[in-house]
Image (spheres, rainbow, N blue to C red):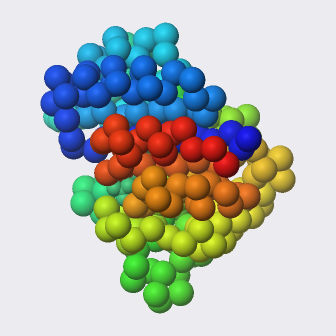
Amino acid sequence: MKHLYIAGNWKMHKTIEEAVSFAKILRERLSATSHTLMVAPPFTALASVAQVLKGSNIRLGAQNMGQEESGAHTGEISPLMLKEIGVSTVILGHSERRHTYLESNELINKKVLLALKHNFEVILCIGETLAERESGKLEQVIHEQLEKGLAGVSKEAMRSIVIAYEPVWAIGTGKNATPDDAEAVHVFIRNVLAKMYSDEVAKNTIIQYGGSVKPENIQALMSMPNINGALVGGASLKEDQFVPIATVVV
Ligand code: 13P
């Protein structure tokens, strides 16, 4: 059976109460799965969900992180605050952060390095817009996001990096990349990592696919040789969708 890393990004959904009751359900229903699992609730629910998931097989993730340890950064959350709660993983460079909140590759890189300094696992999200894909810029965009996002990250530190390929046009649209299209980009990502680091790093790095992952398409996507897991948005919010996704057998 193929080992996968399935993560749920809850985005700006669920109150503390809703998040806690959903986390309790997931803890119970996913206790027997051998896949690596993670959920990323909104910041307000992190501390409460941490209590529910303590000692379980589900990692706790944050959806973003500030670029400094402390200081005058209104509205931002420091890595120290996330550590204190028990967060193990941070999602950085999500396309909603890049496009709605205008986070640059340089800012994302600063956060990546800071997260690694504090021993977080980092899920670095990359992906092209539809306009970029249609104008033939797919490889250029992916290459740049990897090169700039991972600037200064050592070969050793790559063990703590997960890449999530999330084509922007597939996020929340119901239109997932075909397994073949996703696989082709995952192969390209591995080639870039091989050039930046080594064949070993390229082979060992976990690369998730994200973008309209559902129970209906998880099997076909995860069957592709270079896809090692999924970063799930909308379908991670409901028991009847996330449980089959997180327990998929490939
Ligand atoms: P959807 O699964 O809702 O398309 O979202 C994907 C995503 O952005 C996960 O980070």
Q: Count numbered badges in the picture.
A: 0
Q: Judge left or right: residue 170 versus residue 151.
A: left
Residue 42 sits above or below residue 24 on the image: below
Residue 56 sits above or below residue 188 on the image: above
Q: Judge left or right: residue 222 versus residue 79.
A: right
Name which residue lies at 19% across and 35% down: 14
Q: Judge left or right: residue 219 versus residue 19.
A: right
Residue 181 sits above or below residue 215 on the image: below
Residue 102 lies, in percent from the top left, at: 29, 59
Name which residue lies at 25% across and 28% down: 19
**Camera-nearest residue between 6 and 152:** 6
> Which quarter of the figure is the N terminus placed in?
top right
Residue 247 lies, in percent from the top left, at: 54, 38
Residue 148 lies, in percent from the top left, at: 54, 57
Residue 21 sits above or below residue 66 on the image: above
Name which residue lies at 63% across and 44% down: 249
